[in-house]
Amino acid sequence: MKKLNSIKNRNILSFLLLAFSLLLTNSFINLYYLSTLSPDFNRYSTYLSYFLEPNGEIFSEQGVLYYFIISIFIFINLENFNFSEVNNIKNLGNSENLNLFYISDFEISVSTGIQNGNLFLFILGLFGLFKFLKIYNLDNHKIYLILSLLIFFPPSLHLRLTFKPEILGFALLPWALYYFISYTNTKNYFVFFKLLMIVPIILTAKASMTAMIGIFFVILIFQNRKKINIKDLTIFVIISSIIFSVLYFENLNIINRSFFERDDLKQIYNQTEYNNVADPNIFYNINFNDLIRHPESNYHADSIIGITLIDTFGDYFNEYWDKDYTLSKKYRKDFIKSNIKNIFDYSN
């Protein structure tokens, strides 16, 4: 009995830690960052125009589901929906002469709506990870601790701050994995049907996700080929391809372009710098000494490995907590001073 009570108490404490971690990070996000200043917001704000304005149009190449979900949260967050304000969507995210202490209520409402929608998708993904990890018989308290750490992982914060569909992939991929493993273990066709519904949605969210997750599932199927019936695999490929095609053409009808088509958008949004081609050695070049001593952007522009490592555990491109137009940058206190040697600033 004592052992059961100890396990129960440990689970409760771990769950409370998870809930507190979500609350703490969400408070930080709401208070210190405007999602209308997130990377490429101006480019993707046309989705908000489409869903919220009477005659809005989309000028982008991504799937619409994520933006539809976020538009619902923004709509809910606007206390008195006013079309005259919504017509100002094109002015959101303008950092010129921005005064963080005099931001319009409309911009704050849009930013909070984005963050609330992202939080909903993030929690959905955490629940999917919980279900997936339970397949491997992990104790609840261990899963709660893992998820608590994940909440503070910088890429997780990036997802929750940004107005981009990658967080939809985070929300649905754990469920796809859970249903895939459950099906291979049980051959339950109801689970198989759920998997059929989820995979095409992920694959039509964004072109880069189509490529990465498509390759991931090919590898996953190959690794589990002995557990998969060829007939079921054939049915899965055919039906998921049909659902993918339906979603693809529905997106095509709404955005008037394929989500694989984006070359002209570089000119429309003045992003021709994306045409620059890096030297191939950027893929294998790395300076471990500089990576340890100077984990800063200027030292690692010639290294994909360096850039990825720094951005994974920080903000390499200064788009989030290091962005100039954010309170997280304006009122930051540096406790560790770095010069000849690292010194902890006890007085502050």
Image (tube, grey):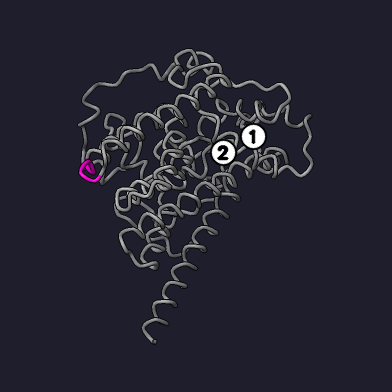
Q: Can you identify the residue that label 1 sits on?
A: 98
Q: Can you identify the residue that label 2 sits on?
A: 325
CB atoms of marks 1 and 2 within 8 Å: yes
Q: Is residue 302 magenta?
A: no
Position in image of residue 159 (x %, y %): 47, 42
Please tell me the numbered disc located at residue 1.
none
Quadrant housing the N terminus? bottom left
Position in image of residue 46 (x %, y %): 61, 25
Magenta-colored span: 223-227
Q: Amino acid at mark 1?
A: Leu
Secondary structure mostly seen in magenta is helix
Query: Along the polypeptide, which appears first: circle 1 or circle 2?
Result: 1
State the residue at coordinates (32%, 38%).
Answer: 232
Quote the CA–CA distance across marks 1 and 2: 7 Å
Position in image of residue 149 (x %, y %): 39, 58
Q: Is residue 54 left or right of residue 313?
A: right
The one of 74 and 343 positioned closer to us in this rendering = 74
Helix, strand or loop under label 1: loop
Q: Amino acid at mark 2?
A: Tyr
